[in-house]
C-alpha cells in the first residue's frame, strides 16, 4: 500500500526566503492532515544549521508522522566544472540531511535548460553528476529520485530534462539500484506532452510520485512556453489547482502504478489557496488510494 505525504507548496516563500514562517508551524499544520509523512525541502531557511535537522525529525515523529522524501534542486548542467562540483557537494549534503531526517528518497534534477546547451552535452553532464552522487547515497541507504520537472521556484530557465524524450534518455542512461523516478503528471502538461505516455515509458522505474493538478489562468500552453525562459520562478499565468479538478486522470495513473507494483510515497503539492484546499486534495488522493490498493 503506497503512503501519502504533503509538501508546503503554498508556504515556500515564507519558509525559504523571508522567514515569516517557521518549520515548526508547517509541521503543526501538516499534522492535522490525513497523511503519513511530510516531504521536506532542502531550502528551508532553518535547514542551514545542521543542528536543526534532528530537531525537525523529532518534531515530526512526535506527531506520528515521518519525513520520507527530500525535495532539492541541483543544477548539474552548468558549463563551469567548478560550479558543477559545488552542486555535487551540495547534493551530498542534502543526502546527509535526508539521512538525518530519517528519509529514504532524495530528489535530483538535471539542471537548467540554458540556451547554449545541446541535448547530448546536457544528458552527459547531468548523468555524470548524478552517478557521482550515487555511491554516497547508497552508503546511506538513500535512493536518488529524478523528477520530470518544470522549473524550480527560484530558477531562471526551465528544467533541461523537461521534455519526455530527454527525460527518458537520462533515466535510461543511469542504471543503479539507488536511482529511480519521481513521477509528476502535472509537469508533463507543461512540456506540452501526455502524462500517461510518459508514465507508460517509465512506470517500471517510478518509486515516488508528486500528486497535483494544474491549470493556466489565462492563455495557452504555447503562451507559457514563450515566456518561461528568462524569468525567475514560475510563469505568472501558471497556477496549481485542487487535485481532482484539473487535467490529470488519476484513475488511469493509479491503474498503471498498481499494475507495476508501485508501493512508494505519493506526495501532494497543493494548497495554494489555503489549508482547506490542501485537505480536500488529501481526501481525494487518499480515497483514490483506497479504491486501488485497499484500506
Image: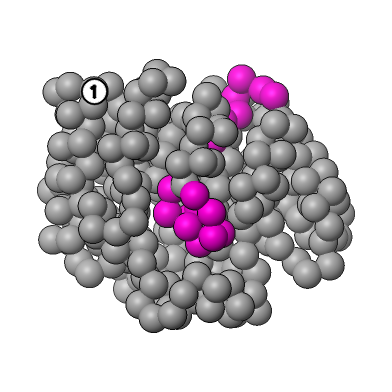
Q: Position of residue 54 (x, y in %)?
A: 39, 39
Q: Where's the C terminus, which quadrant?
A: top left
Q: Relative to 33, say whether 216 is above or below.
A: below
Q: Position of residue 215 (x, y in %)?
A: 36, 67
Q: Residue at x 78, y 60 (%)?
A: 78
Residue 11 or 266: which is nearer the viewer?
266
Q: Residue at x 26, y 54 (%)?
A: 243
Q: How is the image coloured?
A: one colour
Residue 260 colored magenta? no
The magenta segment: 175-194
- Res. 51 in view: no
Is residue 250 left or right of 227 when viewed as pictured?
A: left
Label 1 crowd (10 A; few <14 / some 14-19 / many >=20): some
Q: Secondary structure at mark 1?
A: helix
Q: Where's the N terminus, which quadrant?
A: top left
Residue 229 or 17: which is nearer the viewer?
229
Q: Residue at x 17, y 22 (%)?
A: 294
Q: Relative to 237, say whether 10 is above or below.
A: above
Amino acid at each position: 500500500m503506497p503512503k501519502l505525504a504533503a509538501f508546503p507548496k503554498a508556504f515556500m516563500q515564507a519558509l525559504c526566503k523571508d522567514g515569516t514562517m517557521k518549520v515548526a508551524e508547517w509541521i503543526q499544520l501538516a499534522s492535522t492532515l490525513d497523511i503519513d509523512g511530510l516531504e521536506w525541502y532542502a531550502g528551508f531557511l532553518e535547514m542551514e544549521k545542521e543542528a536543526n535537522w534532528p530537531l525537525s525529525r523529532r518534531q515530526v515523529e512526535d506527531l506520528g508522522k515521518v519525513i520520507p522524501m527530500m525535495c532539492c534542486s541541483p543544477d548539474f548542467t552548468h558549463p563551469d566544472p567548478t560550479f558543477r562540483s559545488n552542486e555535487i557537494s551540495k547534493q551530498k549534503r542534502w543526502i546527509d540531511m535526508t539521512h538525518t531526517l530519517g528519509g529514504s528518497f532524495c530528489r535530483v534534477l538535471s539542471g537548467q535548460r540554458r540556451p547554449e546547451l545541446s541535448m547530448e552535452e546536457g544528458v552527459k553532464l547531468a548523468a555524470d553528476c548524478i552517478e557521482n552522487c550515487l555511491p554516497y547515497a547508497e552508503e546511506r541507504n538513500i535512493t536518488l529520485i529524478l523528477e520530470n520537472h518544470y522549473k524550480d521556484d527560484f530558477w531562471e530557465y526551465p528544467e533541461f530534462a523537461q521534455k519526455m524524450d530527454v527525460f527518458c534518455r537520462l533515466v535510461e542512461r543511469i542504471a543503479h539500484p539507488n536511482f529511480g523516478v519521481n513521477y509528476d503528471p502535472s509537469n508533463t502538461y507543461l512540456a506540452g506532452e501526455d502524462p500517461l505516455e510518459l508514465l507508460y515509458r517509465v512506470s517500471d522505474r517510478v518509486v515516488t510520485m508528486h500528486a497535483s493538478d494544474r491549470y493556466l489562468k489565462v492563455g495557452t500552453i504555447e503562451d507559457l512556453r514563450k515566456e518561461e525562459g528568462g524569468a525567475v520562478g514560475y510563469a505568472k499565468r501558471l497556477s496549481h489547482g485542487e487535485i481532482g479538478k484539473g487535467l490529470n486522470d488519476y484513475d488511469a495513473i493509479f491503474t498503471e502504478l498498481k499494475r507495476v507494483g508501485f508501493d512508494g510515497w505519493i506526495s501532494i503539492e497543493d494548497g495554494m489557496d489555503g489549508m482547506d484546499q490542501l485537505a480536500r486534495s488529501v481526501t481525494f488522493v487518499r480515497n483514490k488510494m483506497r479504491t486501488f490498493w485497499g484500506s
